[in-house]
Image (cartoon, grey):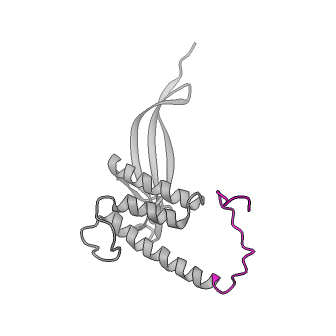
Amino acid sequence: MFIIFGWGRQTLKSFGPVLKYHCDHCNNDKHWDLYCKRTWFTLFFIPVIPYSTEYLLLCPVCKYGVKLEKERFEEYKAIAQCNTALLNKVITQEEHAARMGQLLGADSSKGAVDQEMEGKTETQKNYLRQLKEIEEERAAKAALSAGNQDSTYTETASDEAGGN
Ligand SMILES: [Zn+2]
């Protein structure tokens, strides 16, 4: 009987979008995606043991990106999960904002969002900028929907308010 084994099989797992960055390669401002790239020892073509792990943050347009330290990856992973939850409508925008606030502001004293950009990390600054964009977007939408308030508008929310 032959034992077939190999090295070098690579898998790329996506964790979702993190924060918006400017890409110097393709000149787009997009939410960069978080990835974990593993290289495996395979047995009978089945990945068994990962012997190399890289954490990557990549531009979704051109796949240019940076390698991350594991600590930074864990930090971004929480953000990516939070964003993914919002995209899948598992959480509302308010919940998202609250969670992101916690994730990004855990070490700094809370409050006073648009004061003192100084002393914040790059991640926090980025988030604060985006929070503003979201707020503005929401304000614009609110202004729009204020016009037609006879809502036959139903959204497929994951948790419904009940049977009434
Ligand atoms: Zn790019």
Percent from the top left, x then y, of residue 154? 72, 69
| Residue drawn where x is 37% and y is 68% of the image | 126
Closer to the camera, 96 or 78?
96
| Residue drawn where x is 24% and y is 68% of the image | 119
Asked if residue 61 can be seen in this view, the reply is no
The magenta span reads: 145-164
Closer to the camera, 32 or 1?
32
Q: How many marks?
A: 0
Residue lying furthest left in this view?
Answer: 119
* Ligand 1 placement by image quarter: bottom left
Residue lying furthest front in this view?
Answer: 164
Q: Is residue 126 above or below residue 17?
A: below
| Residue drawn where x is 43% and y is 71% of the image | 130
Split into 4 quadrants, where in the image is the N terminus? top right
Asked if residue 98 can be seen in this view, the reply is yes
Q: Is residue 147 magenta?
A: yes
Q: Is residue 19 magenta?
A: no
| Residue drawn where x is 28% and y is 63% of the image | 108
Percent from the top left, x then y, of residue 115? 30, 77
Residue lying furthest top in this view?
Answer: 1
